[in-house]
Image: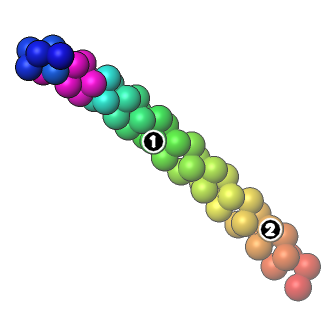
Amino acid sequence: MTIDERIEALTMNLELAFRDIHELKELAHKDGENIRTLARIAEAHQRRIEHLEDGRA
C-alpha cells in the first residue's frame, strides 16, 4: 500500500468518523429535549399530587 493510498484511507475513515459524530450529536440533542419534556411532565404530575394531598390533609 502506497503512502497516497494510506492517506486516502485515513481521510475516508476520518470523514466517516466525523459523520458518525455529527449523527450522535444530533441524537444526543434530541434525547436531551425528550428528557427535559419528561421532566416537565413529571413536575406537573408531582404538583398535582401534592395539591390533591394538601386538599385531603
Residue position for label 1: 28
User: Which residue is more in the foreground, 5 or 22?
Assistant: 5
Residue 44 x/y as whole percent: 68, 58
The tally of labels here is: 2
The one of 22 and 4 positioned closer to us in this rendering: 4
- In this picture, which residue range is highlighted in magenta? 7-15
Q: Residue at x 31, y 23 (%)?
A: 16
Residue 8 sits above or below residue 27 on the image? above
| Residue 51, quarter of the rendered image | bottom right
Residue drawn at point x = 49 percent, y = 46 percent: 32
Residue 6 lies, with reference to residue 18, above or below; the image says above
Image vertical order of residue 18 relative to residue 57, above or below: above
Q: Is residue 45 left or right of residue 15?
A: right
Q: For marks 2 and 1, give the one nearer the viewer.
A: 1
Colour mode of the rendering:
rainbow
According to the picture, the residue beneath numbered tag 2 turns out to be 49
Looking at the picture, how far across and down is residue 52, in whole percent? 84, 70
Residue 23 falls left or right of residue 3: right
Residue in the foreground of this view, choosing between 32 and 19: 19
Please indicate, yes or no, whether residue 22 appears anywhere in the rendered image: no
- Disc 2 marks which amino acid? Ile
Q: Is residue 42 visible?
A: yes
Cα separation, mark 2 vs mark 1, equals 31 Å
User: Earlier along the polypeptide chain: callout 2 or callout 1?
Assistant: 1
Q: Position of residue 29 (x, y in %)?
A: 43, 40
Main structural element of the magenta stretch: helix, strand or loop? helix
**Helix, strand or loop at disc 2?**
helix
Which of 39 and 32 lies nearest the eye of the viewer?
A: 32
The quarter of the picture where the C terminus appears is bottom right
**Mark 1: amino acid:** Ala
